[in-house]
């Protein structure tokens, strides 16, 4: 469910197939933005944390592209919570 929803979003890109508790997804900058596409996921992660919206981490590919790392370890986390986090991430401009 999560994977299919992410693949439908123009600005989200799965970095790898989800593994157990770990979802790695890159967020592309909004249309018309002059933001650095390689850094955008890191910027989004910092804003989510600064605004107390989500506690997520990030990682960087060897080519320098950052992406969010959602570690979903709580037993009550379901698709709706994952979707809410990613929707908040997409709202950041």
Image (tube, rainbow, N blue to C red):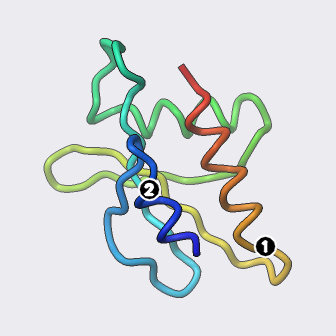
Q: Which residue is mark 1?
A: 77
Give the residue at x 68% y 50%.
85
Give the residue at x 43% y 39%.
41
| Nearer-the-camera pick, 7 or 89 | 7
Asked whether the beta carbons under mark 2 and mark 1 sit within 8 Å of each other, the answer is no
Query: Is 41 placed above or below 83 here?
Result: above
Q: Residues within 10 Å of mark 2 (few under 14, many from 20)?
A: few
- Depth check, mark 2 against mark 1: the one in front is 2
Give x and y (percent) for residue 48: 66, 36
Name the image quarter holding residue 92.
top right
Q: Residues within 10 Å of mark 1 (few under 14, many from 20)?
A: few
Name the image quarter holding residue 10.
top left
- In this rendering, position of residue 9 left or right of residue 17: right
Query: Is 85 placed above or below 15 here?
Result: above
| Nearer-the-camera pick, 41 or 9 | 9
Give x and y (percent) for residue 20: 54, 87
Q: Residue furthest right?
A: 76
| Number of residue marks | 2
Q: Quadrant of the N terminus?
A: bottom right
Query: Is 28 placed above or below 61 here?
Result: above
Does dot 2 land on a helix, a strand or a loop? helix
Does dot 1 land on a helix, a strand or a loop? loop
- In this rendering, position of residue 29 left or right of residue 5: left
Q: Which residue is mark 2?
A: 8
Give the residue at x 14% y 48%.
63
Check residue 20 in the rendering and tell me which mark sits there, or answer none. Answer: none
Marks 2 and 1, the one that precedes in the sequence = 2
Q: CA distance from mark 2 to mark 1?
A: 21 Å
- In this rendering, position of residue 4 left or right of residue 79: left
Give x and y (percent) for residue 39: 34, 32
């Amino acid at each position: 469910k999560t994977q299919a929803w992410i693949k439908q979003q123009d600005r989200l890109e799965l970095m790898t197939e989800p593994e157990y508790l770990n979802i790695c997804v890159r967020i592309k900058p909004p249309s018309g933005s002059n933001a650095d596409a390689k850094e955008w996921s890191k910027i989004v992660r910092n804003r989510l944390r600064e605004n107390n919206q989500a506690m997520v981490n990030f990682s960087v590919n060897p080519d320098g592209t950052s992406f969010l790392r959602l570690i979903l370890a709580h037993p009550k986390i379901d698709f709706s919570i994952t979707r809410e986090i990613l929707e908040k991430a997409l709202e950041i401009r």
